[in-house]
Amino acid sequence: MVPCTAWKAGKQTGCLCYNNCMKQKKPELLVPAGDIERLETAVRFGADAVYVGAGPYSLRAQETSFDIGELRKATAFAHKENVKVYLAMNIFAFDEDLEDMVKYLKEAIGAGIDAAIVSDAGLISLIRKQNKKIKLHLSTQANTLNSEAVKFWHSQGVSRIVLGREVNLEQVKLIRKRVPKIELELFVHGAMCMSYSGRCLLSKHMTGRSANRGECTQPCRWKYELKEANRPDESFPVEEDARGTYIMNSKDLCLIEHIPELAEAGIDSFKIEGRMKSPYYVAVTTKVYREAIDSYYKDPGKYKYYKEWKKELEKTSHRQFTTGFYFGDKDKESSKEGSYVRNYDFVGVVESCSPEKKELEIKARNFFRSGDELEILDPARTEIGKIKVEKIRTNKNEPVEEVHNEFHVFVEIPPSLKASKYSLLRRKK
């Protein structure tokens, strides 16, 4: 039970989530998984659910999608840890896609998925004719922004709505009040498309690859110059910094400072964006939001926000942070600067830790060398560990000074150091 501010103040008549206040449960933490490794990372670091791509029918590149064999393996691993798996099938579908999409979904249901994320009304109709039991989540691509639209989709058999990113939290509360029986999902962290609910035509127009078919080339991230029609040989740079211009970029969404407001809005699922991001990004974002959510729901009245949470999120590759549309005009510059900030490198994964042998076994993912200080993100511990790299040997017992991607090495550690298998290592640039 997590009553909202109005309820706790004894002002029940001013409570927009009145019908929910006495039965609200901890929201689900939903994490992106672009492949098996990232799915396993999300599960280990505390996800309640993960979402994965459905072959060619998901709005991300093919390399972040799962075939049926991979999906079967992924759901088995996740379900063993009581984590749900949702399958994204949210492309803009043409007639020639529908038969294969329904066939793929039938096989995916057999593989054990817990729900399908869809956006196409025709696909929903076809699915419901053949299977009335599979849960359907409506993608943010459907740009659902009001309670009447939510009621309509609920009547079509949709059990959850991923609300459009254009809504603010007061509008979310009103939808929650007017449609209390449907699940609501909201993005809380990650990259944001500059187009309305992600419906962008730039990539298709400029490169022939459609963002609405999972093939976005991200032309909004490119650098541009201005040319005058009568002087085509002259160009005028539109500069924001020394590296060029990013006039169509959006900042990245980050709501880690607003867990209480999100909880009071009655949201059922907090969604992190980033199926194309690294295992390191998945680990950090999952770890931070897990800690914040658990801390709030342990005792809402004594909840304390820790600045270290946002500092951790800033150690991933990101653009400047924004709260998007959720707080109205509070953040007016959500699309002003979009160049990436990359202060840390993900350098390896722990295979084993042996205090007796004073060694840490590492599978390297990036460069590090003797003398570097590495930080350890452990799925079994809240605190961030640290180690000064001194002696390094290969698995063939050869001493080395530098480590590169795919090296298998052993690093000398003090006997007091503890690190679980699958802990991630990072190095400040």
Image: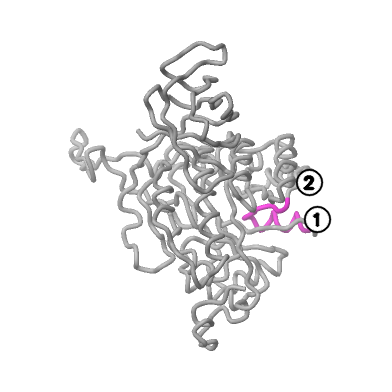
What percent of the width, then of the height, locates residue 130?
81, 54
Provide the residue span drawn in magenta: 114-128
Q: Are marks 1 and 2 in contact (CB under 8 Å)?
A: yes
Residue located at (43% from left, 24% from top): 367
Q: Nearer the viewer, residue 416 or 420?
A: 416
Q: Nearer the viewer, residue 24 or 251?
A: 24
| Amino acid type, callout 2 | Lys
| Amino acid type, callout 1 | Asn
Q: In the rendered picture of this protein, how many numbered marks are placed on residues?
A: 2
The verdict on residue 122 being magenta is yes
Q: Is residue 256 above or below residue 366?
A: below
Please tell me how crowded label 2 is: few (under 14), some (14-19), or many (20+) other residues with Cα within 10 Å. Answer: some
Q: Which mark is residue 131?
A: 1
Q: Which mark is residue 286?
A: none
Residue located at (56% from left, 77% from top): 3
Distance, label 1 to label 2, CA atoms, is 9 Å
Q: Is residue 195 above or below residue 413?
A: below
Q: Is residue 394 above or below residue 89?
A: above
Q: Which mark is residue 106?
A: 2
